Amino acid sequence: MSPTIRPRRLRAGEAVRRAVREVRVHPAELVLPLFVREGLSEPVAIGSMPGVVQHSLDSLREAAVEAAEAGVGGVMLFGVPEHRDATGSGATDPDGILNVATRKLAEEVGDVIVVQTDLCLDEFTDHGHCGVLDDRGRVDNDATLERYDDMALAQAEAGSGLIGMSGMMDGQIASAREALDTHGHSDVPLLAYSAKYASVFYGPFREAVDSQLQGDRRTYQMDPANRREGMRETLLDIDEGADIVMVKPALPYLDVLADVAAESIVPVWAYQVSGEYAMIEAAAANGWIDRQRAIAESITAIRRAGADAVLTYYATEYARTLKETR
Ligand code: PBG
């Protein structure tokens, strides 16, 4: 038998493959997460994330400038404070490391790339949870919203160009939106980590921020088994006024991402998290996979599933290779 329909015709050479490619990644669709640690004069390596560091304020600035030069769309800042307490007061202190770093980068590169901030208490609390605890040690949703509101104001005042709400408290988008609007910051957009799962793939991140967490986040982050609920969380966040929604982690949750992309009326982002990065690095270091191709394929797959942009520790490196091949 001789087939008349031959899909291989469009795969015969790089020119035709390039011409029919359905998805391509642009540097502006990449966001680089960056860690800045209080009191550092030199950057410190993160063992479980080879190539990623905890930055000093100076090295942070250099990394942001490099990202901007590579054409990435933005940077997402995470602060690692020197001192922690029960309410995470470093998060709302204008002189706290995250707010200081935001002010600095917003001035330096804020016109070229979007300087974004992670809004969550886990880096700042001595118990490592994303919220404040009640007298029985449970994460208190509504008391946490008040802390988030104050944190949103501190970040907006520091010049954040996009506030990433990653704490998974009920009502956090509506609450932060109202706080911002009533204090003259109605122009600051909110990125909702909408479908955020209680994932083992955040493991290396815990080292990156010196997390104090005992136990887990399963009373507020989602159960990995739940697909439908990812849509529920997303629709709630859009109703509450989210400007962008996000699915996290990325590669193990492409079904959720595809669902969200099909329904969302706002931009959809996805986060290739620390454990996804660590898996690629570990396999590549052993010579088990081709590192460059694994980076390209994983990010392309996340875009193909429906993400308009991808948070990835590879943002600057991958943006550079995209520039070279264009
Ligand atoms: C919360 C936050 C986390 C990550 C991003 N924001 C940690 C968590 O929810 O436990 C994880 C990102 C990654 O693993 O790369 N501040």
Image: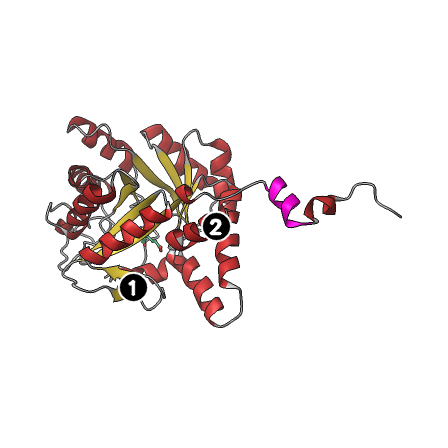
* Quarter of the figure with residue 83: bottom left
User: Could you tell me the amino acid type at mark 1?
Assistant: Glu
Mark 1 vs mark 2, CA separation in Å: 24 Å
Instruction: Residue at the far right: name it.
Output: 1
Instruction: Decide which of tag 1 and tag 2 comes sooner along the chain.
Output: 1
- 36 and 83: which one is in front? 36
Q: Position of residue 299 (x, y in %)?
A: 48, 50
For numbered disc 2, what is the local secondary structure? Answer: helix
Residue at the disc numbered 1: 207
Q: Is residue 105 above or below residue 171?
A: below
Which residue is at 47% across, 49% downward?
A: 322
Residue 85 location, quadrant: bottom left
Q: How many marks?
A: 2
Q: Secondary structure at mark 1?
A: helix
**Image: magenta residue range:** 13-21
Residue 38: quarter of image: bottom left
Which residue sits at x=63%, y=46%? 15
Is any atom of residue 73 visible in this view?
Answer: yes
User: Can residue 46 be found in the magenta stretch?
Assistant: no
Q: Is residue 200 visible?
A: no
Q: Position of residue 88 (x, y in %)?
A: 16, 51
As displayed, is residue 36 above or below residue 268?
below
Q: Which residue is mark 2?
A: 299
The reply to whether the C-beta atoms of the residues labelled 1 and 2 are less than 8 Å apart is: no
Query: Along the horizontal axis of the image, is 286 left or right of 189?
Result: right
Residue 24's spot in the image, x, y percent?
Answer: 52, 43
